[in-house]
């Protein structure tokens, strides 16, 4: 049996983020049982841009800031993708963050 890589486990969580919702690097790390690995989740997100089925734009930092936006093609692609889902972004920060935050279940 081949063990799934950390990045693949991250992508499995990210694929579950509902349309119109966001989560954080830390919430994903916690769901994976590796609460102190939020930065590794960020590296996984940076490496995911060639994967069409991983909605990396829905992953923001713990304050709702679009810290990963520089890793998207174009200057505002991450914001545009979020806004296409009805999420309001002002000054690179998700508005109403607490209400649209999605916490993945700890099961991975």
Image (tube, grey):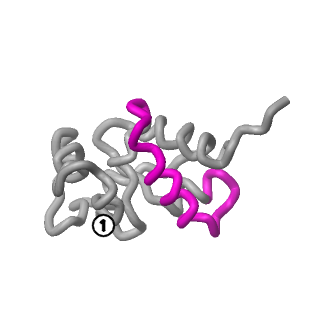
| Residue 38 at x, y percent in the picture | 55, 64
Mark 1 Cα within 10 Å, few/some/many (few <14, many 20+)? Answer: some
In magenta, the rendered stretch is 30-53
Residue at image coords 61%, 59%: 30
Establish if 6 lies above or below 30. Answer: above
Q: Which residue is mark 1?
A: 65
| Residue 11 at x, y percent in the picture | 53, 41
Q: Nearer the viewer, residue 74 or 91?
A: 74
Residue 41 on the magenta segment? yes
What kind of element bears circle 1? loop
| Residue 86 at x, y percent in the picture | 18, 43
Residue at image coords 20%, 53%: 79
| 87 left or right, relative to 30 | left
| 87 left or right, relative to 54 | left
Establish if 35 lies above or below 48. Answer: below
| 6 left or right, relative to 45 | right
Looking at the figure, which quarter contains the N terminus? top right
Q: Quadrant of residue 96?
A: bottom left
């Amino acid at each position: 049996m081949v063990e799934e890589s950390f990045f693949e486990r991250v992508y499995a969580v990210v694929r579950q983020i509902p349309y119109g919702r966001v989560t954080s690097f830390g919430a994903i790390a916690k769901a994976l049982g590796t609460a102190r690995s939020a930065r590794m989740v960020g590296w996984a997100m940076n490496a995911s841009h060639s994967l069409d089925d991983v909605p990396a734009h829905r992953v923001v930092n713990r304050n709702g800031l679009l810290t990963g936006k520089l890793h998207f093609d174009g200057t505002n692609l991450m914001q545009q993708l979020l806004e296409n889902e009805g999420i309001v972004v002002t000054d690179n920060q998700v508005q109403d963050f607490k209400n649209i935050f999605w916490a993945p279940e700890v099961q991975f």
